[in-house]
């Protein structure tokens, strides 16, 4: 009992430094929780790619309709039909995508419905012909391909390696596919195609929507022979463009089932717990090294140790009492860290069924920290050496193992060094716990593996410190 009392008298003498590390840790944890961006956002905003539209088809209704559709969805940057200026715009990333509507596009598109030829791969339907992933703009506006006998529909030039261009491709292809459906099926019978309501024509085409046409415009359309005259062709193109724009203007409301403020709050707490337990390894290591090494330095003084050996207390009992003190102090530091986390993030994550893994992982790391403190207490004899050892070990291990910097952004060389330190495996287990979606054993194996490696480090550190202590005792005797 006297040894136990003496143990905690020495701890009280170092309480100021221990609480200093705890206060620093709590301050860092609060800053991380306040400054970290929320991960619970479920909002979506459509990307506005910067596009240049070069319309070489003049006032054709279909070409103008496509240009207007692109302008409604993307950010259209006005550019002249000058290859050099377009090249500069792509090079300086002022634009990411150039849409070139060739001369004769509208007429060729409408004629393709009668001869069955499209200006693209037949297996893909109407869409883009020229998909050139390089900064090269052609000024050829012939709009024909002598090799295949097919007509180019749309040409495009994109910034090399652009990913947003795929979204533009999808939108343009969607417009042209829908227009081809109306062209091929929406007006097969010219005398009945345009009515007050599309009705049967829409149903046959497979594109519903109840698109309405003004009755006067419908009457005027019926009086026209669509096979003769530019005016009739333009009227038909305008009708197709209006129908396509009406169909593509439809939006679908999406709601997330089961999402609620409570779920979002729980997910936010889970993310905060993972970050908190990651940073806690620094404070826990510093506090335990400071406390246990202070005890070991005091009791390992030569005069005090020799006097204790002359006391009536057996050496085994003395060592077990010191070990019990180390265990109680280490558990107290672990409990202080856990209690601080509960105060900051509440009990929600503790009821979710996964937080106990964080607690177990931190408890195992506490054993490792106790072993490091035990070793430092045997190797260091002065308070100045103790302070240096605490700062070098705690900060050095934290930076090398991913406590302050995520392991995902660290270089392979640093990670290779970190694998020889226990904090690396603690952080690896902490990250795996944060990524858990189920509690299946297949997902828990990497976590258990990292915990076992930490226990291996603890056993090795305790064994090395005990061996050194025994050899030093023999040398002094």
Image: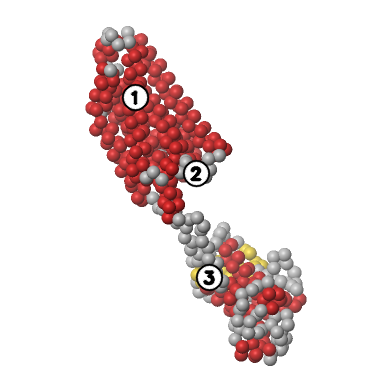
- Residue at the spot 42% in from the left edge and 20% down from the top edge: 464
- Residue at the spot 44% in from the left edge and 34% down from the top edge: 361
Give whichever of discs 3 and 2 has the lower sequence position. Answer: 3
Q: Indicate which disc residue 73 carries.
A: 3
> Could you say whether the residue bearing mark 2 is in a helix, strand or loop?
loop
| Residue 191 in the image, given as x and y percentages of width and height | 71, 86
Q: Are marks 3 and 1 in contact (CB under 8 Å)?
A: no
Label 2 crowd (10 A; few <14 / some 14-19 / many >=20) = few
| Residue 202 in the image, given as x and y percentages of width and height | 67, 76
Q: Which residue is mark 2?
A: 435
- Residue at the spot 51% in from the left edge and 72% down from the top edge: 76
Identify the image's colour scheme: rainbow, by chain, secondary structure or one colour. Answer: secondary structure
- Which mark's residue is nearer the viewer, 3 or 1? 1
Give whichever of discs 2 and 1 has the lower sequence position. Answer: 1
| Residue 16 in the image, given as x and y percentages of width and height | 24, 33
- In space, the residues marked 2 and 1 are separated at their CA atoms by 33 Å
- Which mark's residue is nearer the viewer, 3 or 2? 2
Label 1 crowd (10 A; few <14 / some 14-19 / many >=20) = many
Q: Nearer the viewer, residue 349 or 410?
A: 349
Check the image and report above or below for 403 versus 175: above
> Could you say whether the residue bearing mark 3 is in a helix, strand or loop?
helix
| Residue 284 in the image, given as x and y percentages of width and height | 35, 34
> Could you say whether the residue bearing mark 1 is in a helix, strand or loop?
helix
Q: Are marks 3 and 2 in contact (CB under 8 Å)?
A: no
Q: Indicate which disc residue 326 carries.
A: 1
Q: Nearer the viewer, residue 267 or 136?
A: 267
- In space, the residues marked 3 and 2 are separated at their CA atoms by 36 Å
Give whichever of discs 3 and 1 has the lower sequence position. Answer: 3
Q: Relative to 371, is 252 on the left or the right?
A: right
Check the image and report above or below for 440 versus 146: above
């Amino acid at each position: 009992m006297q040894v136990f009392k003496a143990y905690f008298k020495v701890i009280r003498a170092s309480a100021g430094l221990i609480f200093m590390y705890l206060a620093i840790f709590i301050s860092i944890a609060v800053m991380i929780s306040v400054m970290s961006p929320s991960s619970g956002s479920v909002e979506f905003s459509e990307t506005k790619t910067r596009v240049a539209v070069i319309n070489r088809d003049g006032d054709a209704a279909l070409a103008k309709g496509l240009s207007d559709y692109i302008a409604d969805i993307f950010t259209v940057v006005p550019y002249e039909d000058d290859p050099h200026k377009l090249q500069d715009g792509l090079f300086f990333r002022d634009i990411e995508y150039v849409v070139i509507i060739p001369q004769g596009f509208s007429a060729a598109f409408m004629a393709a419905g009668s001869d069955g030829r499209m200006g693209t791969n037949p297996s893909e339907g109407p869409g883009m012909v020229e998909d050139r992933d390089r900064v090269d703009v052609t000024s050829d506006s012939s709009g024909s391909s002598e090799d295949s006998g097919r007509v180019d529909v749309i040409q495009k030039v994109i910034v090399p390696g652009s990913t947003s261009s795929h979204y533009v491709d999808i939108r343009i292809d969607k417009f042209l596919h829908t227009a081809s459906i109306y062209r091929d099926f929406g007006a097969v019978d010219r005398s009945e195609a345009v009515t007050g309501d599309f009705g049967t024509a829409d149903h046959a085409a497979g594109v519903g929507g109840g698109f309405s046409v003004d009755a006067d415009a419908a009457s005027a359309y019926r009086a026209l022979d669509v096979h003769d005259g530019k005016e009739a062709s333009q009227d038909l193109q305008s009708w197709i463009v209006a129908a396509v724009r009406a169909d593509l203007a439809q939006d679908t409301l999406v709601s997330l089932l089961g999402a609620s403020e409570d779920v979002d709050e729980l997910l936010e707490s889970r993310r905060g717990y993972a970050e908190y337990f990651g940073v806690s390894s620094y404070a826990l290591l510093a506090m335990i090294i400071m406390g246990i090494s202070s005890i070991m330095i005091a009791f390992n003084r030569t005069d005090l140790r020799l006097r204790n050996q002359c006391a009536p207390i057996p050496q085994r009992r003395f060592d077990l009492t010191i070990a019990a003190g180390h265990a109680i102090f280490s558990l107290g530091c672990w409990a202080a860290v856990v209690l601080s986390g509960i105060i900051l993030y509440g009990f929600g994550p503790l009821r979710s069924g996964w937080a106990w893994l964080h607690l177990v992982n931190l408890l195992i790391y506490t054993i490792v920290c106790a072993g490091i403190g035990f070793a430092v207490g045997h190797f260091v004899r002065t308070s100045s050496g103790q302070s240096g050892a605490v700062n070098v070990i705690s900060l050095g291990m934290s930076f090398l193992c991913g406590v302050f910097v995520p392991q995902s952004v660290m270089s392979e060389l640093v990670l290779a060094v970190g694998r020889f330190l226990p904090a690396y495996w603690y952080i690896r287990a902490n990250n795996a716990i944060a990524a858990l979606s189920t509690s299946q054993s297949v997902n828990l194996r990497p976590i258990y593996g990292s915990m076992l490696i930490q226990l291996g480090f603890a056993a090795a550190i305790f064994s090395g410190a005990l061996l050194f202590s025994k050899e030093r005792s023999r040398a002094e005797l």
